[in-house]
Image: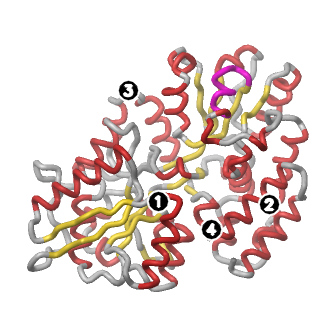
Amino acid sequence: MKKRTSFFVLFVGIAVLTAVPLFANGQSESKSATAASGPVNIRIWDIQTQEDQQMIETATQQFNQAHPNIQAKVEWFQNDTYKDKIRIALGAGNGPDILYNWGGGPLRSYVAANTVVDLTPYLNADPTWKNRFPASVWGPATVDGKIYGIPTQGSDAELLFYNKDMLKKYNLPVPTTWNELVQDAGTLVQNNVIPIALAGKSGWPEMIWVQYLTDRIGGPQVFNDIAAGKKDAWSNPAVIKALELCQQLVKANAFEPGYAGVEVDTNQDVALVASGKAAFLAQGDWAYSTFKNSFGEFFNAGKLGYTAIPAVDPQYANEVVGAPANYYSVAATSKNVKADIQYLSEVNLNDFEVSTMLNKLGRVPPVNGIESQLKSLKDGAFESWLYNTIAKAGDVQLYWDQYLSPTQAKIMLTNMSNVFLMQETPQDFAKAMNAAMSSNQ
């Protein structure tokens, strides 16, 4: 899922961005934390690359210039090895002061090991800082009612892309319900068109369907029970039904031949939609940029459509699967927590970073009050649509494979692929996952 850590999505709230006063150089005023006396060095570990990395470097340099007595330095790591490296470093007590993480399961494990700082008191002491971010963004960073992470980078969400020409050619409605999608798929199969492109080899594109269907059928409490370690929670009827519906799609030839060998990184799934060989694609919002940059003729002709994943139970029609944000946490071993807080409150998603993300990086940060800025962007229609979609969300559920431990996530994706290959039943999947969770793998 490496594409999920750096592409844009949006999030919505109710406060006004301009409520946070900023200096002319883009730094916000010092908030609840007071700079420590004398020189203080802050080490920050992060995994961003290219333009994102340069943005953070620039914002950090601005902070250092404004605060000679606090000098922050960002150290960069590769995404694939970072989780193990930070876990080992925290356990050994020689990690950074501020660490990048995804929230969810990994952050929960840091909290259980007492290796990160409870940031709730600092946020509560500075409502202006806390209210800069949408309330829902705190979910993956919250453990037992306490907040352990500050939002950084953009949010991610999954949606349904489609080829407008294909739907028009066969007089098909844009599906808003699961039954409409199934009916569309049936008509497309009859006309020798692939209904849904799927990069099955990558695993998590299959998870999009299972997770969304589970949420659409049973609501957020289903996975809340799983995350809480409730016994046999994976056997919830909503999970079983979601897997059954996915197998119905497989039996109906809704996915392209050989989908199990298609990888996301090759953009073959996007190419199928852009070429008119497939009608639909469930992907992260970052696929919008892939259509735009790699399939310009299709994109510029206005043939790309997008909509929410179809509903099953109307009461859960507005739920969203995605990542509200990535996070910065403070290590419990840091000797400069007040300085860490000052850095986070002044640098993280300040006006400079917000402007850079909107106007240069092509994505929307998880901060409040950016509606007018969105509308003025070149792709403002798409970004505003996403903004409004998430605004209506009753719940934004973190990707299952990001929330679970790495071992549990691997077991889940492997067994899920077996379900799609018709090599396992939904009940087999639930049994395997219940066992993995009960053994704390």
Element marked by disc 4 = helix
- In this image, 436 relative to 159: left or right? right
The front one of 107 and 390 is 107
Mark 1 and mark 3 residues within 8 Å of each other at the beta carbon: no
Residue drawn at the location 43% of the way across and 85% of the way down: 92
Q: How far apart are labels 2 and 3 at the CA level?
A: 42 Å
Q: How far apart are labels 2 and 4 at the CA level?
A: 14 Å
Q: Which amino acid, mark 1?
A: Ser
Q: Which amino acid, mark 3?
A: Lys
- In this image, 170 relative to 124: left or right? right
Q: Earlier in the sequence, mark 2 or mark 4?
A: 4
- In this image, 250 relative to 106: left or right? right
Magenta span of residues: 269-277
The front one of 378 and 197 is 197
Tell me where residue 412 appears, x and y as whole percent: 73, 63
Q: Is residue 289 above or below residue 128?
A: above
Closer mark to the observer between disc 1 and disc 3: 3
Element marked by disc 3 = loop
Residue drawn at the location 50% of the way across and 26% of the way down: 292
Tell me where residue 417 appears, x and y as whole percent: 79, 53
The front one of 25 and 311 is 25
Residue for badge 1: 136
Q: Is residue 354 visible?
A: yes
Q: Earlier in the sequence, mark 4 or mark 3?
A: 3
Q: Is residue 171 above or below residue 403?
A: above
Q: Which amino acid, mark 4?
A: Pro
Badge number at residue 415: 2
Q: How far apart are labels 4 and 1 at the CA level?
A: 25 Å
